[in-house]
Image (cartoon, rainbow, N blue to C red):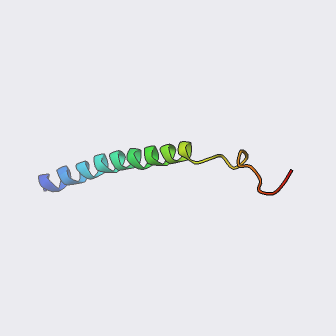
Amino acid sequence: MCGAVVVTGNHYVLDVVAGFAVAGAALGLARLLPRPGIVPRLGGR
């Protein structure tokens, strides 16, 4: 039973770490991609 509690506690810690990793990757990708309002139009004035 103590093992189950430890595994469950570690699971929540890993969820937090994975959440920060996903959020960091999304923010990094958002900084690399051009913003929609700045993309030049093709063939226009």
Residue 2, image x, y percentages? 13, 52
Would residue 11 be found to the left or right of residue 6 on screen?
right
Q: Quadrant of residue 44?
A: bottom right
Would residue 41 be found to the left or right of residue 22 on screen?
right
Q: Quadrant of residue 20?
A: top left
Residue 23, image x, y percentages? 46, 46
Q: Nearer the viewer, residue 7 or 41?
A: 41
Report the number of discs.
0
Would residue 22 be found to the left or right of residue 38 on screen?
left
Residue 29, image x, y percentages? 51, 48
Q: Classify the position of the N terminus by image quarter.
A: bottom left
Residue at horizontal 54%, vertical 44%?
32
Q: Nearer the viewer, residue 11 or 42?
A: 42
Would residue 12 be found to the left or right of residue 19 on screen?
left
In this view, which residue lies farthest toward the left? 2
Q: Nearer the viewer, residue 40 or 30?
A: 40
Q: Nearer the viewer, residue 39 or 20?
A: 39
Residue at horizontal 77%, vertical 56%?
42
Residue at horizontal 35%, vertical 46%?
16
Residue 33, image x, y percentages? 57, 48
